Amino acid sequence: MSFFLASKLRKASNTVAIEKKRDELRSDFEEFEQFSKSDELKQFNELELLVLSDEFKRKRKMIEKKSFKRSELYQEEREFKKYQRSRKFKTYFRLKDSSELSTFKLVGESKDLSRFKELEVLMKSSKLNKKENAEEISEFKRLKASARLKEYFKFKKSRALRIYNEVDNSADLKNYYQLEERISSEEFKNEKVFLLDKKRFEKTEDFQKLQEYQKLKSSEKFVKYFKLKNKNPFGELKKWELTFSDEFDAGNLDTNKWITRYFWGDKLMNKGYTLESDLHTFTDGQNVKIAGSLISLMARKEVKEGLVWTPKLGFVPKKFDYTSAIINTGNSFRQKYGRFEAKIKVKNPAQVQNSFWMVADKSLPHIDIFKTLNGGKLMNGNFWGSENSPQKSEFKVKGIDLAKGFFIYTLDWSANELVWKINDIPVKTQKTGVPQDPMYLNFSIAVKEARNDLNAEMEIDWIRCYQRK
């Protein structure tokens, strides 16, 4: 292993920070996925589609460019005022309700005027006889001298009455009244106020929608969503789906997931056993403890009987000076390819062999995802082939101070490659001997050397397995 990689591992030894970063990313991803399906985002997208559309921009530009002076309203008001300012309309409306016109109309309908017109015809007639019509002549002169009739005839010949009669019932007067009705309407007044308002766009429904869109876009929730969407930090998370996990927070070992023996001992004999090279016996769960969301596998110096497997004699009873623990998923979970990881801390790793490993139905293939040798060295590896012709590839990992506590150990397994990682730092890639069989998980402590001060322990915070979507 290179000095550069060892340096990277030393820098990545803060597991708490790494896990926090992972948890935050996972939390952000879950929040992001949930928000992506929300009605709130759907509403925002609909608003964005509207306010960024060419039609919306065109309507806004049209509204903002509007001017009262360039409007039809302005032309109507101008025409109306022109009528109001004209001399003939001033004359018309001055006379329209005046006493002068009222008196003129009353006189025009009076008996005096009617009698005067009748006598006037007689006065111009050839049949007029001064003696015989003396009375009518006197009456005519009296009426002709009447101030009322004089005023009537004077007004009848006046320019003002001529203008009044010209305007009354004209097309112009009809247009005037139509304009007056239009200009005095609430619709006209409101439209005029709107057109005179330089902030007229702000009074529209479109502006309200624009405000709503901008408010949503600038909100903390949306800013975070779009930042994550643009940055897209979830590429790796999206590739995987969880297939197996145990957080050990139930208070006791989940026997639906785990057995506390080698799989084949449980399968064939319903008993545990130990390999000939080991100095311990597995106590079928007595050396397993769960507390505070942690599972502990412990090795102790204590005498206990158990079975040992030897190639020549098979399963033989034996008295052991040490006890230890193993858990595996041989009965519950096996997987071909994927990501397999656990957060592990070891106590006194120099005393025992701590292992996180995977194996298929036979002893090969076998992968050590995490293994400490006596002396506390970290040595991982891959074993394949057959019992008659086994092959292996082992490698040491430097730069990890196991005394610092928990580390996350990961294996990424694909059809053509194995990648070992510690705290997300790749430490080894192998493309030969890649297993093609489903494998199950094992966690164990093995006592390989006799010692009186044995006090070793492997703590596991969680175990998680994934497969590619």
Image (cartoon, rainbow, N blue to C red):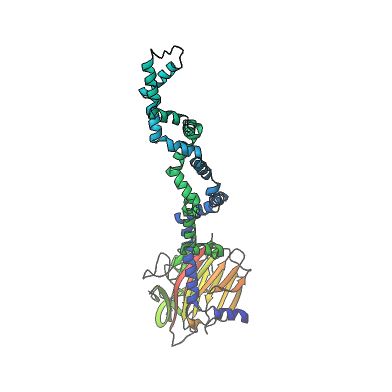
Q: Nearer the viewer, residue 208 or 393?
A: 208
**Which residue does the image show at 56% across and 63% down from the upper left?**
230
Q: Position of residue 351 (x, y in %)?
A: 48, 84
Q: How many marks?
A: 0
Q: Quadrant of residue 97?
A: top left
Provide residue 229's location: percent of width, then percent of height: 54, 62
Residue 332, placed above or below residue 154: below
Q: Quadrant of residue 144?
A: top left
Residue 313 appears anywhere in the view: no
Q: Quadrant of the N terminus?
A: bottom right
Horizontal side of residue 42 vs 290, given as left or right:
right
* 440 and 468: which is toward the camera: 468
* Front in this rendered view, residue 308 or 412: 412
Q: Given the current orientation, which residue lies at the most extreme bottom position?
A: 452
**Residue under the point 50% across and 37% down:** 88
The quadrant in which the C terminus is found is: bottom right
Residue 149 visible (yes or no): yes
Whether 160 is drawn above or below 268: the answer is above
Farthest residue to the front: give it. 131
Placement of 53 over or under 365, stated as above or below: above
Quarter occupied by residue 282: bottom left
Residue 155: x and y in percent read 44, 31
Q: Nearer the viewer, residue 135 or 344?
A: 135
